[in-house]
Amino acid sequence: MSLDSVPKELRNLRACLLCSMVKSFDQFENDGCENCENLLGFRNNASMIQQCTSSSFDGMIALITTQDSWVSKWQHIKNCAPGIYAVSVSGRLPEHIVRELEEDRRGVRYISRDRRQQN
C-alpha cells in the first residue's frame, strides 16, 4: 500500500462521495482519488472536490488487502485501492454527475454512502 493516499493529519479531511476514500483537500487536489480520478477528475479541480467530497463522515477503515476483506465487501469497496475509507459519508453526488456516470458509456452504478438516507 502506498502511503501517499493516507492522510497526513486528522484535520480538514474529506471523503469521496463515490468510493468513500478519505484524504485531505490538498491530497485530492494534488493526487486525485485513486479510485475515481478517471470518472470525477479531482486533480487540480477545487470545484469538483467541493461538489463530490464531503467533510462530514463517520468512522474510518484502513483497508490494505481489498480482495480478502469482509469489510471491503460489506462497504462495497472490494475493488478499490488500499487506503483509508469512511464508514458512512453524509451527502450525495450532484444529480447531473450521477446521470453522467450511469447514462454515459461509463456504466457506473452510484451507491450512496450516506447511511442516514437508508433508514
Image (cartoon, rainbow, N blue to C red):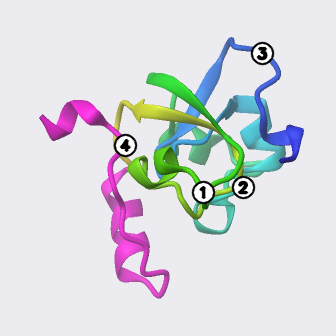
Label 3 close to label 4 by CB (< 8 Å): no
Badge 2 or badge 3: first in the primary sequence: 3
The image position of residue 28, as x and y in percent, is 72, 41
Mark 1 / mark 3, whichever is N-terminal: 3
Residue 115 figure quarter = top left
**Residue at the spot of label 4:** 113
Q: Secondary structure at mark 4?
A: loop
Q: Is residue 117 left or right of residue 65?
A: left
Residue at the spot of label 3: 9
> How many residues crowd around disc 3 within 10 Å: few (fewer than 14), some, or many (20 or more)?
few
The reply, left or right, for residue 2 in relation to residue 78 is: right
Magenta range is 94-119
Q: Nearer the viewer, residue 59 or 46?
A: 59
Q: Quadrant of residue 56?
A: top left
- Mark 1 or mark 3: which is in front? 1
Which tag is nearer the camera, tag 1 or tag 4? 1
Q: Residue at x 19, y 37 (%)?
A: 117
